[in-house]
Amino acid sequence: MVAREEVLDDLGIDEREEAKEEEIKAKEMIGRDDILKKDVFTRVRKNIGFILTGQRAIGKTEVLKWAYENYEGDKLYLSCNDTYGEIIKSIAKKQGITLNRKTLSELEKEIMKGKKITLFVDDFEALKPKLAVLLTSWNVWNTMYIAGVEPFREEAKKITWGKNKIKILPIALEKRRELARHIREKIGTMISEDVIANDCKGIPGRAWAIAKGEYVREDKEHVEGEEINISWVLMFVLVGAMLIRYIGMGMGEKDLYILGGIFVAFGFLFKMLVREVGGR
C-alpha cells in the first residue's frame, strides 16, 4: 500500500508570505552596535554565513532579523519550528516554482535544482532530522545564516561545520537603563526604569517580560557572566571537615583525624581555585 503524500497548492501562500515579512522586521536594538557593525554587517555584506548562539531571550532572533533586512540578494527567513511542508513551500515560492498540486517529494527535487537563495534559519535547536537532511544538501551551494541555543543535535554538525560562531552576550551595564527607557516608551508600562534595568540582567527578552508584568522565574538559565554564590557550599564543606577532624581527635581515631585534615586542605585549595577562575 502506497503511503498518502501531502499534495500542495498555492492557496493562501501569498497572504502568509506577506504576513511573515511583517513579522521578521527587526525591532530597534539597544546596546548591540558593536556586534552588528563588527561581526554581523561585514559578514552579511561579504555573503559569509555565521551562527548566532547564546542563551534564551538574549536577542539572537532580533540580530538574525537585522541581518536579514540588511542582506542584499535573494533570501528567505524561516524557523525550525515551522513544519517541513511549510518550509518546502516557502522555498519553492521564493524560487518562483508553482506548486500545482505537486507532492513534497516532487518539490524537494525541484528546489534543489532551482536558483540560489540565502536562508536565514532561526530556532536551530529545534532542527528535526528530515529538515537536517535538506539543509545539509542546501548548505553545499547556498549561504546560510543560523541562530539557536546550543547544543545542537548531531545531524546539525555538517551544516554548522566551518561557520563562524558569534556569541550574543548580555547587554552592557551602561546600556541597560537605555533599554529599560526604550521599552517603557514602547509599551507604557508602570514598572519603573530602575526595576527593569536592574532585574533584567542584560537579557532583552527578560526586560520585556518584566516591563509587561509577567512572572520571571529566578531559577531560569543562569546569566552568562553573572557570579555564582557558592560561599554557603564552601562553608558546609569546611565545617564538616573540621567536625570530622575534631571528632577524630576526641575519639583517638587517627584515620578520621587524617581524613578531616585532607578535607580542610581540599576546601582551602578549592576556594583559591574558585577565586582565581572567577577573577579572570
Image (tube, grey):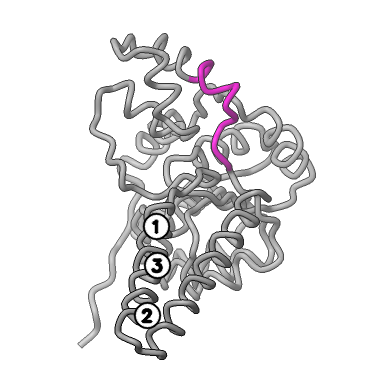
Rendered location of residue 157, percent (x, y): 58, 72
Q: Amino acid at mark 2?
A: Met
**Vertical position of residue 278 compared to residue 208: above or below:** below
At label 1, the amino acid type is Met
Label 2 vs label 1: CA separation? 21 Å
- Nearer to us: label 2 or label 3: 2
Kindly identify which numbered label has been placed on residue 172. none
Q: Few, some or many C-alpha atoms within 10 Å of disc 3 (few <14, some 14-19, many ≥20)?
A: some
Question: Mark 1, residues whose alpha carbon is within 10 Å: few (<14), some, or many (≥20)?
Answer: few
Q: Would you say the residues marked 1 and 3 are in contact, meaning their CB atoms lie under 8 Å apart?
A: no
Q: What is the total number of numbered labels drawn onto the structure image?
A: 3
Image mark for residue 249: 2
Q: Nearer the viewer, residue 75 or 182?
A: 182
Question: Looking at the rendering, in which quadrant would you find the N terminus?
Answer: bottom left
**What stretch of residues is rendered in magenta?**
169-179
The numbered mark, 1 or 3, whose residue comes first in the sequence reads 3
Is residue 246 a member of the stretch shown in magenta? no
Residue 75 lies, with reference to residue 158, above or below; the image says above
The residue where tag 1 is placed is 235
- Per the model, the C-alpha gap separating discs 1 and 3 is 46 Å
Residue at (43, 28) in percent of width and height:
22
- The answer to whether any part of residue 116 appears in the image is no
Q: Nearer the viewer, mark 1 or mark 3?
A: 1
Q: Which residue is mark 3?
A: 128
When the figure is inspected, residue 37 is found, relative to residue 130, above or below; the finding is above
